Amino acid sequence: MWYVILLVVAVCLLVFIIDRPAMLLKFEDGKLVQQKGNIPRGFLMGCKDIAQKQPFSGKIKVYNTRFNTKLVFSKTVPSKVKQRIHNVFPYSGGSRKRGKRA
C-alpha cells in the first residue's frame, strides 16, 4: 500500500513541480550569464544584441508543447524587450495554412 502512495508522489513531482524548459537563457545587466539547451544561433545572437542595446536582467525560458513552442519571461524583463525577443524568435511563425489575401 505504501508503495502506491510513493509512486503517486513521485509522479506528481515529475509532472507538476520540476521545471523542464527546452531552452534557458539567463541575463544579468545585459550580459548572458547562463544558457541551456539547443539554442538556434540566430536567436542567441539576436538576444545578445537586444541585451547589449537595452541592458536587462532576467530569464527567458522556451517550452515545447505538443503543437507549438512557448516563450516565458521572468517579471524583471521589460515589455519592450519581450516584444523584441518575440520578433527574433524563430519558432513563432503561426499557422502555415494561410490563405491568399485579395
Image (tube, rainbow, N blue to C red):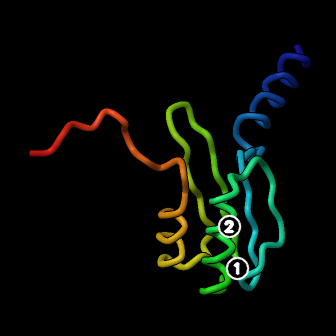
Q: Is residue 5 above or below residue 91?
A: above
Q: Residue 69, percent across and down?
A: 55, 44
Image point (69%, 63%), residue name: 44
Helix or strand or loop: what does disc 2 sit on? helix
Q: Residue furthest right?
A: 3
Residues 17 and 31: in front is 31
Crowding near the residue tagged with mark 2, few <14, some 14–19, many ≥20 C-alpha atoms within 10 Å: few
The answer to whether 43 appears left or right of 88 in the picture is right
Q: Residue furthest top?
A: 1
Q: Residue 18, percent across and down?
A: 78, 44
Q: Quadrant of the N terminus?
A: top right
The answer to whether 16 appears left or right of 70 in the picture is right
- Give the alpha-carbon distance from disc 2 to disc 1, as whole Å: 17 Å
Residue 45 - label = 2
Q: Is residue 97 above or below residue 39?
A: above
Q: Residue 20, percent across and down?
A: 75, 44
At label 2, the amino acid type is Met
At label 1, the amino acid type is Ser
The tag earlier along the polypeptide, 2 or 1, is 2
Helix or strand or loop: what does disc 1 sit on? loop
The answer to whether 65 appears left or right of 17 in the picture is left
- Which residue has dot 1 on it? 57
Q: Residue 15, percent across and down?
A: 71, 34
